[in-house]
Image (tube, rainbow, N blue to C red):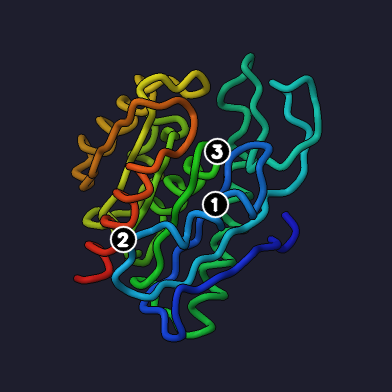
Amino acid sequence: MEEVEFLETATGANPVGCVIWMHGLGADATDFEPIVPLLPLEADLRFVFPNAPVRPITVNGGMEMRGWYDIDPNSPLASGDDIRASVEAITQLIEAEVASGFRYDQITIAGFSQGGVIALELGLGFRKRLRGIMALSTYVNDHEHLAERVDFANVDTPIFMAHGVSDPMIPITRAITSRQTLLDLSYSVQWQEYAMGHQVCPQQITHIGQWLNTIYSR
């Protein structure tokens, strides 16, 4: 995968941490940037919003759009190579943030929908301790074989999972199955569900800010 383009913003001059936040299918790096000023943050943070590459998406008739991986309903696990390539690309972003002065344990990896799949895949398998993993309206890819892919460097890393109870794109049952898979492997999961579809709501934005405050005050 080519080097990832990204937007960056910070809430103050001396951020105590960095949040790398990935968008969902068909969106781009601008999708979550407007949320930053709405977060009730108590500490200054740097936010990095990467752009997924443009690729044909099978489930959408081969239409080209930004996506972290292809989705083929007839072959649900065929996206593995794409997912691994995206994980590698975001890992390079993490390394760049570390090279710029952040420690690994100051970095939170976050994502919505497809981006959340990458956040979980990367965070659970990363060999250095991260500060947090945020997974919004998403699921664990190939959860039945997750235990074979994880690295327990992040077994104590806080995970924030949130989902809409009426999500038409990713049924909440899929997210609940993913949460249970994480709990069975002794991960620490904070779970929130909201009366919404495949989106983000104001109450959730408040909870995200509170969660970030909690993990960065440790």
Give whichever of discs 1 and 3 has the lower sequence position: 1
Between the C-alphas of marks 2 and 3, the distance is: 21 Å
Task: Classify residue 8 by image quadrant.
Answer: bottom right
Mark in the foreground, 2 or 3 = 2
The spot of residue 126 in percent (x, y) is: 41, 58
Kindly identify which numbered label has been placed on residue 114. 3
Determine the secondary structure under disc 3.
Answer: helix
Mark 1 vs 3: CB contact within 8 A: no
Determine the secondary structure under disc 1.
Answer: loop
Residue at 23%, 44% (x, y): give it: 190
Disc 1 packing (10 Å; few <14; some 14–19; many ≥20): some
Q: Front-most of 62 and 47? A: 47
Q: Amino acid at mark 2?
A: Leu
Residue at 62%, 19% (x, y): give it: 75
Between the C-alphas of marks 1 and 3, the distance is: 14 Å
Determine the secondary structure under disc 2.
Answer: helix
Quarter placement of the C terminus:
bottom left
Kindly identify which numbered label has been placed on residue 32. 1
The spot of residue 58 in percent (x, y) is: 73, 24
